[in-house]
């Protein structure tokens, strides 16, 4: 990777947090892509985007005090949403029920759609037999496009994702007309805490290589 490749992950100071670009590395997008970010700033000032961003900023008053669940409730309330959609994985049905109860108790109307709605199988996407878990068997398929269509069709003003598979969440976000937020993502191995894989990656027996590649120096010098 060239030193000029935008890579905020490798920025040592993140001084942009303080609005200071005086010692920004060569790959800093605030400098290298100033034109793109200026256009984005202009879009942020469009009335609807501006209102959404203001409500995000308002949640910061309780930063570090509220759980993700509580922040989701707060944001929905600040936005004035009345009807919320919940798209969840069948494997998190219990969590979906608890969260639905919470939203109802908080005064929202809730529509929930399970990933199995529509009873799809791998046959519907022409999955080759050799790619199935068990050849010759019916392999259920998630239906994220269908979930988005159901929730949008019910007039949900904000759709919340709970534990959709990697890629299924992508399809849902791509096809949802309503704004989307994520409550939790799926990690079957780490109790739905995918960052755990990174936090433990320095263990001597880890199978994840999170060390910076040795063949090149840190971008930006």
Image (cartoon, rainbow, N blue to C red):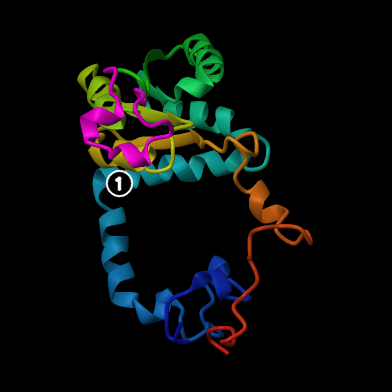
Q: Is residue 38 above or below residue 157?
A: below
**Does 39 lie within the magenta span?**
no
Side of 203 where 221 appears, left or right: left
Residue found farthest to the bottom: 221
Instruction: Pick the residue in front: 169 or 101.
Output: 169
The quarter of the picture where the C terminus appears is: bottom right
- Given residues 51 and 16, the one toward you in this image is 16
Q: Up-down: is 5 above or below 59?
A: below
The mark tally for this picture is 1
**Rendering quarter of residue 164:** top left
Neighbour tally class for label 1: few under 14, some 14-19, many 20 plus, Cα within 10 Å: few
Name the side, left or right, on which 145 lies relative to 105. Answer: left
Task: Measuring from the top left, give residue 60's x and y in whole percent.
Answer: 56, 44
Asked if 121 appears above or below 200 in the picture, the reply is above
Magenta includes 122?
yes
Residue 135, position as x, y percentages in the image = 37, 31
Reading the image, the residue beneath label 1 is: 49
Q: Give the secondary structure at mark 1.
A: helix
The image shows residue 148 at horizontal and vertical percentages of: 27, 28
Which stretch is magenta? 118-139
Horizontal and vertical percent position of residue 197 = 65, 50
Asked which quadrant contains residue 154, the reply is top left
Q: Residue furthest right?
A: 204
Q: Residue at x 57, y 74 (%)?
A: 10
In this rendering, is residue 208 above or below 109?
below
Closer-to-camera residue (186/179): 186
Q: Main secondary structure of the magenta part?
A: loop
Taking the spot 62% from the left edge, 40% from the top edge, the residue there is 193
- The residue shown at (34%, 23%) is 138
Q: Is residue 156 left or right of residue 88?
A: left
């Amino acid at each position: 990777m060239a030193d000029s490749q935008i890579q905020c992950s490798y920025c040592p100071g993140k001084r942009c947090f303080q609005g200071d670009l005086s010692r920004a590395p060569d790959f800093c997008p605030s400098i290298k892509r100033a034109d793109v970010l200026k256009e984005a700033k202009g879009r942020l000032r469009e009335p609807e985007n501006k209102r959404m961003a203001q409500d995000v900023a308002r949640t910061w008053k309780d930063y570090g005090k509220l759980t993700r669940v509580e922040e989701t409730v707060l944001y929905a309330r600040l936005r004035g949403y009345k009807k919320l959609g919940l798209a969840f994985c069948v494997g998190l049905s219990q969590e979906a029920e608890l969260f639905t109860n919470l939203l109802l108790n908080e005064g929202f109307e809730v529509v929930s759609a399970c990933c199995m709605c529509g009873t799809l199988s791998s046959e519907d996407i022409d999955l080759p037999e050799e790619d199935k878990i068990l050849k010759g068997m019916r392999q259920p398929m998630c239906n994220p496009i269908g979930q988005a269509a159901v929730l949008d069709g019910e007039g949900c003003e904000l759709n919340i994702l709970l534990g959709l598979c990697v890629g299924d969440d992508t399809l849902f976000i791509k096809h949802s007309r309503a704004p989307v937020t994520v409550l939790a993502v799926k990690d079957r191995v780490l109790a739905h805490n995918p960052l755990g894989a990174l936090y433990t990656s320095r263990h001597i027996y880890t199978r994840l290589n999170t060390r910076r590649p040795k063949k090149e120096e840190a971008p930006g010098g």
